[in-house]
Every structure is written in structure tokens, then in C-alpha cells.
Amino acid sequence: MRCKRTLLAIIASTALVHAASAQQKPDKVVIGYLNLVNAQLVTKALGLHEKEMGVPIEWVKFGSGGDVNRAVAANQLSFGGVGNPPATIGIGRGLAYRGIFVLNMLGPVESLVVRTSKQIEKPQDLVGKSAAAPFGSTTHYLIIVYLRGAGVDPTSVKLLDLAPSDAVAAWLRSDIDAAYVWEPSLNKMVANGGRILMDSGTMATRGYPTWDIAVVMDDFAAKYPDYVTKFVKSECAGVDFWLKKPEETAAIISKELSLPLDDARRMMQGTGVVPCDKQLTDAYLGTSKAKGKFVDTLVATATFLTEQKRLPKVESRQSYEDFITPKYLEAALGK
């Protein structure tokens, strides 16, 4: 009888373990991704998350990091992607997410395009002109920094809050004279009477680096930490594919964004994709024990946005350090 009770206890205990294990598998993972050129498009196209996680993946496309923040606030995502200005705004507004993976460093893939017929040769020539940028985005941040750095009051330029696709429509109607946006919208303006005045790669050399980072929602990470590591592992596989197979990657980018193959190749050249082990160095995320320079960028961005009245205050440095969370990448790489 005692043996029977022991056997029943073991069976019950095993059932509880299996039930607990089953609860740690999400029914579905929702990934918000930015409509731009980076290795996450490879991850999406090859179904790498589906293969790694073994659960249904819903991909939701967003035009800017500000749009992602709004979806986060509405509890619509498991993972998302934001640039450093929207990340800084999200931290200031108490959005419950963490930065876990470098999606890309921004270079010429993001640029300030001006209308050739308006003879805009320098920042001072933008005074009195109409320019577009998605407010709260990396490009909104950079166009203001660019103007201020040249001694131009940003209020002397009519800045319009337009998503890249809306900026293209406004450009084709001749409603705007300039726009700081990213590919593929950027090239549509260049091809229709525009030229590049400044780009994000050059702004980075002037001390204003911009980047996009993958974020995970705090509640998802608390419930499914192993799946956050799986997410990062899949993203690393996409980065490896990008770095090792550029022609196949260009074909994927071309298909995902409905671009000519040559345009996809060119846009890839303007995007910095960081190898996963390098992301754990001081120049990027750093490690769990010593966070990297991304924290400095967040503090600098917050200071700027506070001066511009986009944020009420700069949070404590610890708040920005807490946002940068390399532990899942460390786990994925066995560090």
C-alpha cells in the first residue's frame, strides 16, 4: 500500500512538473518590426524564430519607433524594435521593456534629402523651408541636432511630423522641400528630384550615433525567459546569414521591401549590422557586469530631448543601465 501511495505521489509530482513546463511555452509570439533594411528581415523571411521557438509567430510592421512605443503601451507586442530616441522616450514614460539585441547601426541608409530645385546647399538654406521627419524618431533627433550644430534655430524650419511613406507622398506633391527619412522611402525622393545633404553615418562621426535595438516586454521576459534567449539566438542566425551570404541576403531584402536588387545591395552598404559577439563589447551593449556605450548614448539623447521639451526630465543613469540587458545574448552565446 505504501509503495502504491509513493508511486501515485511520483506520478502526481511528474504531472505537476509537466504542467508547469507547458505553462512556460507561449501560445503565440508577436514581433513588431521596423520597415527598414537590417538582418531581422532575413530572420523573418527564413522563419528562423518559428524554427527555434516552435510556436506561431505574428509579425507586425511599423513605420517608426514611435509607433512601436504606442503598440507597447497598448500591450500588443512580445518583442519590438526602436531607435535610441524612442527608446529614451519609452524609458522616460515608464514603458516596461528592455533592450536586448542590436538590430543595426544607422549610416547612409538614413539621410536628409533636399529638393534640388530649391538650391539647398547648407543647413542655413533650410530656414523658411518645410521639412519632414517622424517625430520622436532617430531622424527627428538628428535633423534638430544638425540644424543646431550649424547655428540654425530649428523653429525657423517648418518641421512636419510625417512617417516615411507619408513624407514620400508629400514630396511627390511638392508639399515639402526636405525630409530626414530612411530607406526605401529615401531613394524614392532622391529619384524624384532630390539629393542627399547629410546622412546618419556622418552624424555619428560628429558624436551623434543612432541605432535600432530589439526590445522585449518585461512581462513576456518574466514568464518566458528561455524564449527571450531563443529570440536572440534566432536574430544572431539572421546576422550571421547577412554577414556570410550578402548576395542571398540582398535577394531577401529585395523581396521583403519590393525593391530592385541593386537598390537592396546599396541599402545594405548603408546599414551597420553588428556581429553578435561584438555586441557584448564596450562600444555597444557591453556585458551584464559592465554596460557599454549604448548607455551613454541614451543619456545624451535624453539630455537633448529634455532640452527640446520632448521629455520632462533626464532619468537616473541607472534607469538607462537597467534598460540595456545583455544577459539573453550572453546566454545565447554561452558566455
Image (spheres, helix red, strand yellow):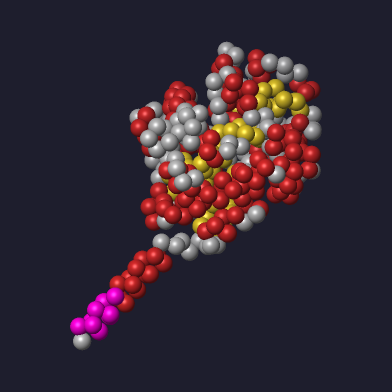
What residue appears at the point 61 percent right and 43 percent down from the top-left corner? 239
Q: Is residue 174 above or below residue 247?
A: above
Q: Is residue 43 above or below residue 191?
A: below
Residue 147 in picture, x, y percent from top left: 59, 19
Can residue 275 be seen here? The reply is: yes
Residue 143 in picture, x, y percent from top left: 60, 25
Can residue 294 be seen here? The reply is: no
In the current view of this chain or complex, which residue is farthest to the top?
151
What residue appears at the point 53 percent right and 62 percent down from the top-left corner? 54
Magenta stretch: give its range: 2-10
Q: Nearer the viewer, residue 30 or 127?
A: 30
Q: Nearer the viewer, residue 309 or 45?
A: 45
In the current view of this chain or complex, which residue is farthest to the bottom?
1
In the current view of this chain or complex, which residue is farthest to the left?
2
In the image, residue 4 lies in the stretch drawn in magenta: yes
Give the number of callouts.
0
Q: Nearer the viewer, residue 126 or 202?
A: 202
What residue appears at the point 72 percent right and 25 percent down from the top-left corner? 196
Question: What secondary structure prevails in the magenta region?
Answer: helix
Residue 166 in picture, x, y percent from top left: 67, 40
Q: Is residue 6 above or below residue 125?
A: below
